[in-house]
Amino acid sequence: MTTAHAPHSWPGFGRVIRLPGVYAPQADSHFLAEAIGRENVRGRDVLDLCSGSGVLAAHAARLGARVSAVDISRRAVLAVRLNALLARQRVTVRRGDLMSALPGRTFDLIVSNPPYVPAPHAALPGRGPARAWDAGVDGRALLDRICHVAPRALRPGGTLLLVHSAVSGAETTVRCLTEAGMQAQVSDRAYIPLGPVMRGRLAWLRERGLLEPGQDKEELVIIRAVKR
């Protein structure tokens, strides 16, 4: 049986229920929430892709958006529903693999904080907490797929906001979205202390040249892409 943790107050997000194995709000969540706040979302259709705990979906709903949220994890779907109720916000939640959960739907804004941490193994975990962050040896297993499917799910003039670590290739994301017909750029950068997952893989990340010797901070980027 899945046991919910008691609601915990998260700065900027209010009270949030944690479920085991579901990604908790972290620096990248707050970073993306700030970017969402700079968009005009009131009355717009917004999709939170790879929603995790659902804090970004609830945040967009508070700003007046009509929000849908998608995650492949059953526990994440439950967490999104619980946290939307806790926030007293209406969020339509679907379980599925990216846009397969909402075939044919289009949106004014898509936001995503997907798994993006490079891992020593190519196979993606099918369960457990690592499912929320492991993304193949280059960290792009989900990023490349989102770059492929998101442009088709955006209306003309629609926007994608995608957050990930620079170690996963910001330039590659910009190039992929540009090739898909989007006007893409790195709109925001932030430096944060390495988290426990990155610290646990320091030797491997340095061996692959993804982190410099002595580097103790990680660069986060937000890619903002507009459909032409």
Image (cartoon, rainbow, N blue to C red):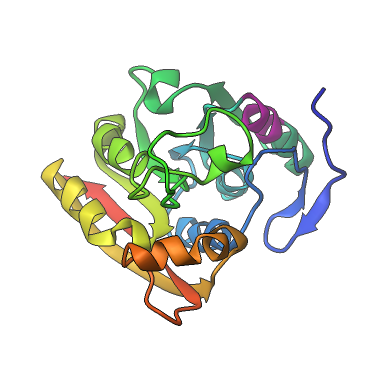
Q: Is residue 92 magenta?
A: no
The reply to whether residue 102 is in sight is: no
Give x and y (percent) for residue 28.
52, 59
Q: Is residue 169 left or right of residue 177?
A: right
Residue extent of the magenta highlight: 74-81
Residue found 32% across the figure and 62% down from its top: 208
Seen as rendered, the residue at the extreme bottom is 214
Q: Is residue 143 left or right of residue 31?
A: left
Query: Foreground: 154 or 144?
Result: 144
Q: Is the residue 169 above or below the residue 52 in the image?
A: below
Q: Is residue 92 left or right of residue 35?
A: right
Q: Look at the image and tell me in which quarter the N terminus lies.
A: top right
For the stretch drawn in magenta, the main secondary structure is helix
Q: Is residue 153 left or right of residue 220?
A: left
Give x and y (percent) for residue 41.
46, 48
Q: Look at the image and tell me in which quarter the C terminus lies.
A: top left
Residue found 58% across the figure and 26% down from its top: 93
Query: Foreground: 66 or 4?
Result: 4
The reply to whether residue 162 is in sight is: yes
